[in-house]
Image (cartoon, rainbow, N blue to C red):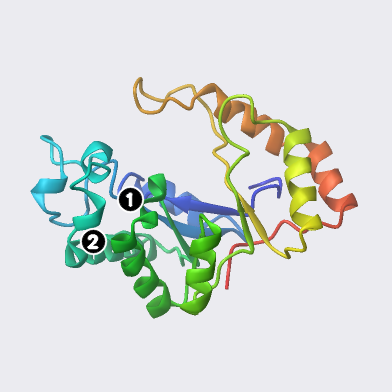
């Protein structure tokens, strides 16, 4: 973000510290979204116990079980997701978009809540599929023209691959594209916290490359904020 290659980030509001939020609020010209979460960490509201593990935390296994997403209680989901957005606002951030951890807004029951929250607050939403893009457009919710999720995972991370994905997007005629990325450090991450460790550092190296910034400039691609 400091080098200008990444202009947008999303925050797991139930897993971030006040100190981290304060640091982010001071970062200039950065787009911040709420990474809505029902699968990891502790809820910020009294969420129904049936969808929490034995420690009172969210459980991906429970939410993605056959009895999970389709029957998530709309009222509880709305209260929790609204509170997660509220936590960012209370710490000096102004979210301009919504997406979700593990793409939980792919569940129709969660997507309905997310669309309502987005319309009430005038926020954009990440469209994770062409169908969702059309659905959001029909609901009057802004979204990027294309969502690129293939700059992620083992053997998928290189500047050449990223350039090719962006070229393909340009050739298709889209004007805005979001590239999902997870740059970071593996050192200090607790064991079992994530399987995606060394790849974060490779993403960080790629996205911090001066050669990448030069290529983007030469191609006339503007790295922009995720805002309505």
Query: Residue 60 appears in which quarter of the rendering?
Result: top left
- Asked whether, in this view, residue 218 is left or right of residue 188, the answer is right
Q: Helix, strand or loop at disc 2? A: helix
Numbered label attached to residue 77: 2
Residue 215 in the image, given as x and y percentages of width and height? 85, 44
Compare residues 120 and 185 and report the one nearer the observer: 120
- Asked whether, in this view, residue 112 is left or right of residue 161, the answer is left
Q: Quadrant of the C terminus?
A: bottom right
- Asked whether, in this view, residue 56 is left or right of residue 95, the answer is left
Residue 179 in the image, given as x and y percentages of width and height? 62, 49
- According to the picture, the residue beneath numbered tag 1 turns out to be 37
| Relative height, residue 136 to residue 225 (above, below) | below
Q: Residue at x 28, y 49 (%)?
A: 38
Compare residues 65 and 33 and report the one nearer the observer: 65
Residue 74 in the image, given as x and y percentages of width and height? 21, 65
Q: Residue at x 86, y 44 (%)?
A: 214
Q: Residue at x 9, y 48 (%)?
A: 49
| Relative height, residue 99 to residue 179 (above, below) | below
Compare residues 63 and 123 and report the one nearer the observer: 63
Numbered label attached to residue 129: none
Whole-number angstrom distance, CA of label 1 to CA of label 2: 10 Å
Residue 217 in the image, given as x and y percentages of width and height? 85, 52
């Amino acid at each position: 973000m400091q080098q200008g290659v990444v202009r947008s980030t999303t925050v797991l509001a139930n897993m971030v510290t006040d100190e981290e939020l304060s640091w982010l609020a001071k970062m200039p010209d950065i787009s911040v979204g709420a990474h809505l979460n029902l699968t990891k960490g502790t809820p910020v509201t009294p969420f129904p116990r049936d969808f929490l593990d034995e420690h009172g935390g969210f459980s991906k296994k429970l939410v993605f079980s056959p009895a999970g997403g389709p029957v998530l209680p709309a009222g509880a989901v709305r209260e929790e997701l609204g509170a997660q957005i509220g936590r960012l606002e209370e710490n000096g951030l102004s979210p301009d978009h919504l997406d979700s951890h593990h793409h939980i807004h792919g569940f129709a029951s969660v997507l309905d809540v997310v669309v309502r929250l987005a319309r009430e607050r005038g926020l954009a939403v990440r469209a994770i599929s062409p169908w969702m893009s059309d659905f959001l457009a029909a609901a009057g919710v802004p979204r990027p023209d294309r969502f690129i999720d293939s700059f992620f995972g083992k053997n998928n991370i290189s500047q050449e691959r990223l350039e090719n994905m962006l070229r393909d997007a340009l050739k298709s005629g889209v004007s805005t594209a979001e590239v999902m990325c997870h740059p970071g450090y593996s050192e200090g991450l607790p064991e079992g916290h994530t399987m995606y460790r060394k790849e974060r550092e490779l993403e960080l190296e790629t996205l911090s490359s001066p050669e990448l910034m030069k290529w983007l400039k030469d191609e006339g691609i503007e790295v922009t904020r995720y805002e309505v």
